[in-house]
Structures are given as C-alpha cells and as structure tokens.
Image (spheres, helix red, strand yellow):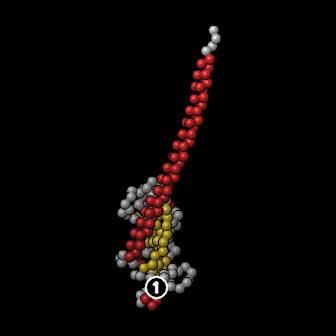
C-alpha cells in the first residue's frame, strides 16, 4: 500500500494555517496594547485637566474671599489658611493640603466629584507698588494719582487632587485689592 499524498498536504496546510493564525494573534495583541496605552494616556490628560480646572476654581474662590469686605488684615497670622509674609507653609508639602489640618482652606462647590475638595491658602505680602522694587508686586493702571490708597498684595496658592487622587496640581497667583 502506498500512502495517500493528500494526507501529507493536509498536514502541511494545517501547520501553515496555525502559523498564520499565531502571527495574526500576536498582531492583534500588539494592537490592543497600543489602544490600551492610548486610553491610559487620554485618561491621564483628562485627569490633569480636571485637576487644573478645580485648582483654578479654588484660586477664584480665594479671590472672592479677599473681595468680601469682611476679611481684615487682622485675620492674617501663621495658620488657618491666612498667613503673613514669610509664614506660609510649603506648597509642595503634602501636610499643607491635608483635609484634617488647618494649613489650608477647602474650596466647595466644584461641579465634578473629586477625590478631595480643592484647597487654597492666602499669604498677605504687603502693599503693592507702582515702582520697580525687588519683592513688590507692581500693578499697572494704578498710581498715587488715582486718589485711593495703595492696593494690598496677596499671594494665593491653590491645590487640587483631581477625580481619582492620582494627579495633583498646585498653582500660584498674585492678587491686589484695595481694602
């Protein structure tokens, strides 16, 4: 009896098909890994944007707090989120933003659900100047001829953790107001 040649060909076709299937599976896995990586990058960018927006929200709340005429310079000291010049905490220290501490003030009302409420602190840095002096804030379109007192200068530092708490943003702004 002679072997039927078709059986050998079918075996070769099966082996070739399995190799092609293996290559296609590896290509599909590689494509899925790329898609997952891009999804993670997109999520990280979105998380960063939400964290930045909520820190800006806290910054604006601090500005509104300063515009409220009930805040006086006597309110500024060495804790409770209101500091005199040189006494503000380190904005990069995690304990500054701890919700159980009193180093910063919680901002409320941000429309997204966040891991923690955005927070801010304000440092009174003195009267502003219209002249170039080191360490002073210069305010344009305002001088001694406007009839008012010199504006008071404040440094506002705001922080937010974002939705999942993995992204953090700290922003700083200088603000002048006539009290």
Which residue is identified by label 1? 142
Q: Looking at the image, is 87 positioned above or below residue 141?
A: above
Quadrant of the drawing holding the C terminus: bottom left
* Mark 1 neighbour class, 10 Å CA radius: few under 14, some 14 to 19, many 20 or more: some
Q: Give how far across and how far down residue 7 sits, in percent.
A: 59, 18
Res 160 → quadrant: bottom left
From what the image shows, is residue 37 above or below residue 141?
A: above
Which residue: 59% across, 18% down?
6
On the question of residue 80 being in view, the answer is: no
Judged from the image, the secondary structure of the residue bearing numbered disc 1 is loop
**Whether residue 57 can be seen here:** yes
Residue at figure coordinates x 53%, y 85% from the top left: 131
Q: Nearer the viewer, residue 84 or 12?
A: 12
Quadrant containing the N terminus is top right
The image shows residue 105 at horizontal and vertical percentages of 41, 66
Instruction: Describe residue 46's horizontal placement relative to residue 67 as left or right.
Output: right
| Residue visible at 52% across and 46% down in the picture | 35
Q: Decide: is 137 above or below 29.
A: below
Percent position of residue 158, x then y:
46, 66
Residue in view at x 37 percent, y 60 percent: 111
Q: Position of residue 118 (x, y in %)?
A: 43, 62
| Residue at the limit of the structure toward the right, as seen here | 2
* Label tally: 1
């Amino acid at each position: 009896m002679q072997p039927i040649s078709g059986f050998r060909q079918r075996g070769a076709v099966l082996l070739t098909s399995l190799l092609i299937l293996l290559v296609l599976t590896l290509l599909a896995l590689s494509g899925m890994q790329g898609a997952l990586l891009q999804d993670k990058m997109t999520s990280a960018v979105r998380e960063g944007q939400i964290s930045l927006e909520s820190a800006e929200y806290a910054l604006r709340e601090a500005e509104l707090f300063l515009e409220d005429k009930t805040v006086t310079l006597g309110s500024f000291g060495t804790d409770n989120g209101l500091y005199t010049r040189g006494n503000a905490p380190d904005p990069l220290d995690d304990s500054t933003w701890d919700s159980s501490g009193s180093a910063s003030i919680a901002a409320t009302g941000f429309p997204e659900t966040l891991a923690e409420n955005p927070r801010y602190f304000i440092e009174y840095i003195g009267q502003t100047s219209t002249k170039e002096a080191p360490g002073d804030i210069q305010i344009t379109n305002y001088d001694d001829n406007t009839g008012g007192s010199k504006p008071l200068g404040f440094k506002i530092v705001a922080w937010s953790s974002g939705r999942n708490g993995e992204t953090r943003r700290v922003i700083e702004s200088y603000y002048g107001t006539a009290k």
